[in-house]
Image (cartoon, rainbow, N blue to C red):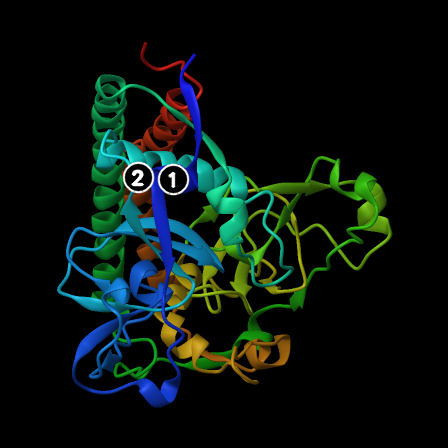
Amino acid sequence: MWEKVKLGELATFINGYAFKPSDWSSEGHEIIRIQNLTKSSSETNYYKGQLDNKYKITKGDILISWSATLGVYTWNKSDGWLNQHIFKVVFNKKEINKSFFIYLIQYVLDDLKSQVHGATMKHITKGNFDNTLVPLPPLPIQEKIATILDMADELRRKDKDLQTKYDELAQAIFIDMFGDPVRNEKGWEVIKIADLSNVSSGSTPSRSNDSFYVGNIPWVKTGEVRGTTILETDEKISEEALKSSSCRIYPKGSIIIAMYGQGKTRGQIGILGIDAATNQACAVISPSKKMNYAYLFELLKQNYEDLRSLGRGGNQPNLNAGLIKNYEIINPPLHLQEAFAKKIELINQLKAQTNAQKSEELFQSLLQKAFKGELVS
């Protein structure tokens, strides 16, 4: 069996500096925030003062976001300053492969996600992180594991890149046929979503009743609304939960808009590939013969930024059902919508051949096996 060590023995995890908006500047070194790592925001702020060098980030540093979004990243840009809620990794032991360590942290974070506290702002504590026991095989084994996972990771990245290109092709076809849907330079008829179909939302059954979450009814949360067809959900609810809450089952083909959530979530679009219930943060546009929903799905994805801009309230603006019902969209003739949908169907067939889901599942399977000692010996 491999040696077990605490993460705090492998490395020192330095938390970032608590910058205030008054510290921000238009010059100096970039302040690295979680949004910059996840690319959920293009906003860049700088700090022109001087801090302890422990807060400085240089190219090649390993960074771990430990609040809201849990993830591990390699910094590949110029020097910057480390913001709070991010750990910078400083290795304590020499006998560790850097690539192996990054995969190890991915494995640890996947496990910790089920244990973190915080109802809306999930985060881990430094004490728990430092004391997490992890396997530490000999360096040659680390290198073997890293090599295998590198190859699996490259495969899934290529599949994701190809899927992105197909998505970009769909966007280009949409713009060619209908123009910018927000500016509506082609002068199409405009209708409100409420004139198209019903808009409603779901509910969250009581978390105090465990039996509500052991059913077989798919239950969609906003984090699962990512601009794709929803075929599976992280959680499923029971018939009892359905009867004891405001949840209802929406049919396959319904369009979902995330009304609020962390990072990029607000304004994201999904389409049900299965019958499913949703939580209260999802607005659901029921199927309607008035519009082709393959067209509507792409239109709303194109309108993502415009939808987000409608958000209201405090530090984390939200959408609501009223705003979505009154949201105006272009309504070209139905035969053009259907012609577009046929082209999208062909693109989706090509996307399905990339095996992106299979390559993701392969990587996750190998990741689990690697740190259970089942991948190499």
Whether label 1 touches label 2, CB < 8 Å: yes
Residue pictured at 30% horizontal, 36% vertical: 101
Q: Nearer the viewer, residue 202 or 293?
A: 202
Amino acid beneath label 2: Ile
Residue pictured at 33% horizontal, 35% vertical: 103
* Residue 46 in view in this figure: yes
Residue 196 badge: none
* Residue 343 in view in this figure: no
Per the image, the residue denoted by label 1 is: 105
> How many callouts does the rendering have?
2
Q: Nearer the viewer, residue 188 or 15?
A: 15
Measured as percent of width and height from the top left, residue 202 is found at 70, 60
Measured as percent of width and height from the top left, residue 193 is found at 54, 74
Residue 182 lies left or right of residue 269; in this view the side is: left
> If the image is split into quadrants, where does the N terminus sit?
top left
> If the image is split into quadrants, where does the C terminus sit?
top left
Residue 92, above or below 370 = below
Label 1: element kind: helix
Residue 369 lies left or right of residue 170; in this view the side is: right
Q: Residues within 10 Å of mark 1 (few under 14, many from 20)?
A: some
Amino acid beneath label 1: Ile
- The image quadrant of residue 20 is bottom left
Label 2: element kind: helix
Q: Nearer the viewer, residue 269 or 130?
A: 130
Whole-angstrom CA distance, mark 1 to mark 2, is: 5 Å
Q: Extreme top residue here? A: 377
Per the image, the residue denoted by label 2 is: 102
Residue 163 lies left or right of residue 18; in this view the side is: left
Residue 187, above or below 105 = below
Residue 375 lies left or right of residue 152; in this view the side is: right
Q: Extreme bottom residue here? A: 22
Measured as percent of width and height from the top left, residue 60 is found at 17, 51
